[in-house]
Amino acid sequence: SFHQSFVQSNHVSSGYFANDVDTSLTARFGSSTSFGIGEFSQVYRVEKPVRNNFSTGSSETEHAHNMWAVKKSRRPYTSNGDRTRKMREVQILEQLRGREHVIEFVTSWEAKNHLYIQTEYCENGNLKDFLAQAGFKGRLDDFRIWKILLELAQGVKSIHDADLIHLDLKPANVFTDWEGVLKIGDFGMA
């Protein structure tokens, strides 16, 4: 039907499918790989910044691995109000910059009515996947249980100290960096 073909063509042009080439990413980074698709966003691992065209923020030279995550809104803005709601996540991440157990914000940009949010890349994945793997091996040791609880509590406290509430705290939104430090991420509902 006409409606179905319109929806399909609209999804392809808006970057809905993971294998579409996203020129906004290829213009900024020499390498981008899709590694997660959620209900509201698609996440890419990016590296090799194209320095001549775009700045990736001051954290670029500080990040030892020159690798970041970029979260792209899956659907284009539907209205000014929708854009304002999505931009709120950027404001929150800027407000939480520099907190140890919160994902580090680098920069954001907009292209073709999509919002892109660049953050640090946590090489060790998320807590949901870790707990699923650990569950096959048996019970977690007490040290690791207390480490998880302590770091989550410190992260939540720093969010609350900034007069914010996360509202979507779950293992899939808790990430582990290359040193094993837990970082709370995904502030789309905060």
Image (spheres, rainbow, N blue to C red):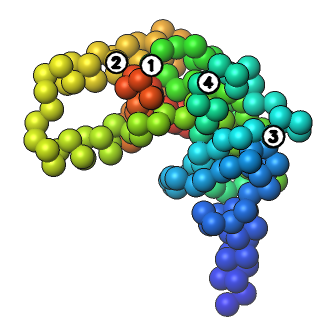
The disc labelled 2 sits on which kind of residue?
Glu
Q: Is residue 176 left or right of residue 107?
A: left
Crowd tier of the residue under label 3, counting other residues whose Cα lies within 10 Å: few below 14, some 14–19, many 20 or above = some
Task: Name which residue type carries label 4.
Answer: His
Residue identifier under label 1:
101
The quarter in which the N terminus is drawn is bottom right
Q: Nearer the viewer, mark 4 or mark 2?
A: 4
Query: CA gap, disc 3 to disc 1?
Result: 29 Å
* Residue 173 in view of the camera: no
Q: The residue tagged with tag 3: helix, strand or loop? A: loop
Give neighbour class at mark 2: few <14, some 14-19, many 20+ (Cα, 10 Å). some
Query: Mark 3 or mark 4: which comes first in sequence?
Result: 3
- In the picture, the disc for residue 151 is 2
Is tag 2's residue or tag 3's residue first in the polypeptide sequence?
3
Tag 1: amino acid: His
Badge 3 is on which residue? 50
- Are discs 3 and 1 less than 8 Å apart at CB? no
Q: Which residue is mark 4?
A: 63
Three-letter residue code for mark 3 = Val
* Residue 123, above or below 15: above
